[in-house]
Image (cartoon, rainbow, N blue to C red):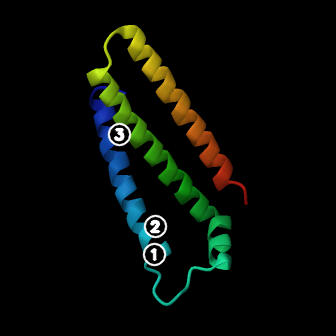
Amino acid sequence: MKGAKGWVLQRITGTLLFAGLIVHFSVMHFSGSRQITEEFVLERISSPYWKAFDLAFLSSAIFHGFNGLWGIALEYVGGPAWLKLSRTLLLASAGMLMLAGIYIVTLR
């Protein structure tokens, strides 16, 4: 995505990733006296709230990363045919990762 829309979405997803990272580290790594057990993880991943959080975090990460790769492709890939191939490969890769992530998050 190019132009102002891509630039704004890159900043928004970067902010969401930073906030999500803080939540992730707070819950999973700095939980204090509460130990991270199998039961805790199973309870967390079965909650609709956490599923929504994980999907938003995943969506933000995939968009942010692949939009950044697209920006690099725009700078360094020469020729319209190579640019079209790059775009197709990036979209296919992002789509496959998103589908795999949705499948994994919604297993329980």
Image position, residue 45 (x, y; %): 64, 65
Quadrant containing the C terminus in the rendered view: bottom right
Q: Secondary structure at mark 3?
A: helix
Quadrant location, the N terminus: top left
Q: Residue at x 51, y 50 (%)?
A: 58
Query: Which of the two labelled residues, at mark 1 and mark 2, occupies the earlier sequence position?
Result: 2
Q: Which residue is mark 2?
A: 24
Q: Amino acid at mark 2?
A: His
Q: Judge whether 75 appears above or below 105 on screen.
A: above
Q: Is residue 22 left or right of residue 50?
A: left
Give the quarter of the image for residue 47: bottom right
Which mark's residue is nearer the viewer, 1 or 3?
A: 1
Q: Is residue 66 above or below residue 43?
A: above
- The reply to whether callout 1 and callout 3 are in contact (CB within 8 Å) is no
Q: Amino acid at mark 1?
A: His
Q: Earlier in the sequence, mark 3 or mark 2?
A: 3
Residue beneath label 3, please? 9
